[in-house]
Image (spheres, rainbow, N blue to C red):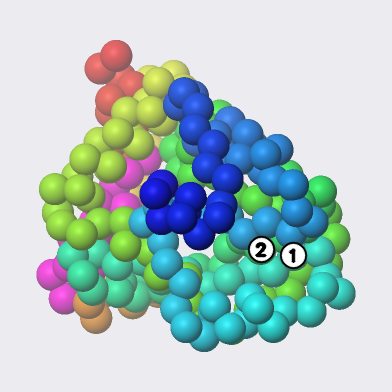
Amino acid sequence: MQFARGAGAVVVQREWTDFVDARRFALASVRTPWALMLDADEALDDVLCDAIGEAPDDVDGYNVRRTTYFCGHPMRMWRNEPLLRLFRTDRVTLKANPAASADALLHEAWSCAGSVGELRGTLLHFSYPDVASYRAKYDRYTSLEAQRLHGSVLGFIGACATSVLRLAWLLFGKGALLDGPRGWYVAYESAIYPAVAMGKALLQ
């Protein structure tokens, strides 16, 4: 925060509620026509920095392409993910996009009512510097989703069966197989994510 204040930014702090509410509060605090939304573990590469500065204002928002890193390596299955992050402040809405529970307030995504362009460059996502950080976030998110699920044996069996298809798609369709053991690990854990959340819901 000291760096932001030192650069002249207004820093706002508040008590944590949930992911969706926090982002909506942040947007409501913006006093400029345009907003760029970034997380603390994200950074802009040089190309994206230049593209933002040069972007024309003849659209209502811009998608950026995000690549997520795991243990210091970019993952193919998390490469070039299109996300709306630069937009006119009054032209967007936010909703949750959970993987397992329909109303869990996480994995939120912005949507724009008007025209959307795309920016050059990459949004770098350094969310998982090591396995421990990945496991901690994984456990937290699946627990949050489990709180909004009605646990059922049939639901758990269905989620397990779907995990096989999800794993095949991530390994072969998204290229996780080519990332070696790191890619296999995150593909497997991502594939079973809904089943883990449902399993936790059953035990609640």
Q: Relative to residue 199, is residue 105 drawn left or right?
A: right
Kind of element beneath mark 1: strand
The quarter of the image holding the C terminus is top left
> Of marks 1 and 2, which one's residue comes earlier in the chain?
1
Type of residue at label 1? Answer: Gly
Q: Is 187 placed above or below 89 here?
A: below
Asked if residue 134 can be seen in this view, the reply is: yes
Residue in the foreground of this view, choosing between 54 and 1: 1
Task: Give percent across and percent down for residue 85.
Answer: 61, 60
Can residue 132 be found in the magenta stretch?
A: no
Q: Residues within 10 Å of mark 1 (few under 14, many from 20)?
A: many
Q: Relative to residue 108, is residue 67 drawn left or right?
A: left
Type of residue at label 2? Answer: Leu
**Residue under the point 13% across and 70% down:** 181
Q: Is 139 placed above or below 129 here?
A: above
The chief SS type of the magenta part is helix
The residue at which mark 1 appears reads as 61
**Residue under the point 66% across and 63% down:** 86
Q: Relative to residue 83, is residue 75 drawn left or right?
A: left
Residue in the foreground of this view, choosing between 164 and 51: 51
For the residues bearing labels 1 and 2, Cβ distance under 8 angstroms: yes
Task: Give percent across and percent down for residue 95.
Answer: 64, 40
Task: Give percent across and percent down for residue 50.
Answer: 58, 83
Label 1 – label 2 distance at C-alpha: 6 Å
Please tell me the numbered disc located at residue 86.
2
The residue segment tinted magenta is 180-194
Kind of element beneath mark 2: strand
Q: Quadrant of residue 63?
A: bottom right
